[in-house]
Amino acid sequence: MSQYIIRRLLIAIPVLLGLTIATFMIANLMPGDYVDAMIPEEQRVRMGISSEDMEVLREHYGLNKPVVERYVIWLRELVLHGNLGKSLYTGEPVFSEFSKFVWLTLQLTGASLFLGMLIGTTIGIFQALHPHSFFDNLANFLTFVWISVPDFVFGIISIYFLSFKVALFPLGGAGPPGGDYGILTRLHYMGLPLIMLTLGRLPGYMRFARNSMLDVIHSDYVTVARAKGLIERIITIRHALRNALMPLITITGMSIPGLIGGAAIAESIFVWPGMGRWVVDSIRNRDYPVIVAMNLITSTLVLGFNLITDIAYAWADPRIRYD
């Protein structure tokens, strides 16, 4: 197992390097740059700012250098000093800003992943234990409709019914402005984005849990366990459920990138001050250091979760070995 982990970590290095190159080049292919985003054309005309003045600003921010040279400088700082660069918009180190936003995003995405997995898996297993029942048929129909609906639709619906009609949750933000608040207040403000992200995760877990459990409960070893006279509850929990977890481990690892992308939408809709909204603002401002650094961090998280998924496979199924 240790050799497998080391090999995976070594393979991750060129993968991450290629991702940073692609992101850096694509980011610089966007029309305009940070200076253009900072001073739009109509503002330049109104203020009488000349092209020479714009070039002076580009030289100040280092944007007048070739793309390859800027990438080499960025990579050198990262490798030698662990420096992800400075935000062009705020002038603060990217890692310092990341540490301010990441905790709020982890709260939101972690809670939605846990609730989506818990609720979706429970419903899917109940469907598998009662196949072709009214509840199973209704849940299947709703799942097919549900899975084709974008996440932001759930956000709009939850705002309309749970904020305007009933006023259960505030429209946005992470807490009351200018005041200290406890965990209950934070959970209250987290309600709408959490509902949006959780609802987006449910259909996948329901379908995978149902299909996986149906495959397992009709397996030979489950039939043998019933023939021995074991209690159905013990058969379900000890024999069927653990083997049914294998596809759920896969979908959990694969859902991390989509969850991060969904968090960016949710944070923008509900003004949640997390790193998703931070990245969206950085793209709007052409803040290249933040864009590249966040892609590197996100890619590292995805590779890390994939590695954790493989390790979880070995834990859930003793037959799997990576030696």
Image (spheres, grey):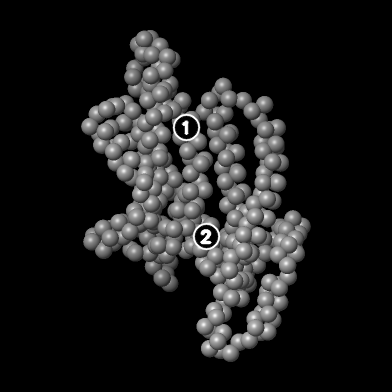
**Residue 161 screen position, x and y as percent:** 26, 58
- Circle 1 — which element? helix
Asked where in the image residue 79 lies, by quadrant, the reply is bottom right
User: Which amino acid type is marked by label 1?
Assistant: Pro
When the figure is inspected, residue 8 is found, relative to residue 14, above or below; the finding is above
Nearest the camera: 67 or 199? 67
Disc on res. 247: 1
Of the two numbered discs 2 and 1 on the same chain, state the one appearing first in sequence: 1
Quadrant (top left/top right/bottom left/bottom right) for the N terminus: top right
**Residue 172 screen position, x and y as percent:** 38, 64
Instruction: Let me know if residue 203 appears in the view.
Output: yes
Q: Residues within 10 Å of mark 1 (few under 14, many from 20)?
A: some
Q: Residue at x 44, y 63 (%)?
A: 268
Asked where in the image residue 93 lies, by quadrant, the reply is bottom right
Q: Residue at x 46, y 34 (%)?
A: 248
- Circle 2 — which element? helix
User: Which amino acid type is marked by label 2?
Assistant: Met
Q: Residue at x 58, y 25 (%)?
A: 320
Instruction: Let me know if residue 290 appears in the view.
Output: no
When the figure is inspected, residue 67 is found, relative to residue 297, above or below; the finding is below
Residue 246 in the figure: left or right of residue 63: left
Q: Which residue is mark 2?
A: 275
